[in-house]
Image: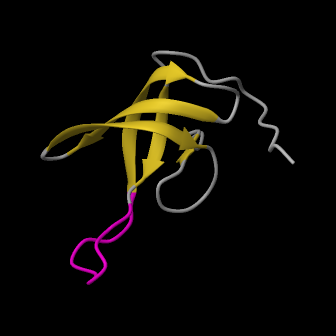
Amino acid sequence: MKEKILMQPSVGRIVHYQSHGTPGGEYKSEPRAAIITGVVDETTVHLCVLNPTGQFFNLDVKHGDGPGRWSWPPRV
């Protein structure tokens, strides 16, 4: 069953991408800022992920919690 999200993703929106970290634990999994560069459907997007040392592009990223997923930033 497909997960239903309240807000619809659109190109140019800022989201969080949860990084994978490294298997040995040198780098932890942590949220990174990302810009939606394309929308596949309401839960799958293409991202430009912004890291302190550069950026990378990630296609077909699913919405949700955990490494390799995107989510809406919390309201502060």
- Up the image or down, 42 lies above or below 19; here it is above
> In this view of the protein, which residue sits in the foreground, 72 or 59?
59
On the image, the x and y values in percent for residue 32 come to 36, 47
Residue 15 seen in the current view? yes
Residue reaching furthest to the top: 11
Tell me what residue is drawn at x 25 percent, y 38 percent. 56
Tell me what residue is drawn at x 45 percent, y 46 percent. 17
- Residue 31 falls within the magenta-colored stretch: no
On the image, the x and y values in percent for residue 42 come to 70, 28
- Up the image or down, 3 lies above or below 25; here it is above
Residue 73 seen in the current view? no
- Residue 24 falls within the magenta-colored stretch: yes
Q: In this view, does 35 lie to the left or right of 75?
A: left
Residue reaching furthest to the bottom: 24
Q: Main secondary structure of the magenta part?
A: loop
Tally the numbered discs. 0
> In this view of the protein, which residue sits in the foreground, 57 or 13?
57
Which residues are the magenta region?
A: 20-30
Q: In this view, does 54 lie to the left or right of 20?
A: left
On the image, the x and y values in percent for residue 8 come to 70, 23
On the image, the x and y values in percent for residue 76 come to 55, 42
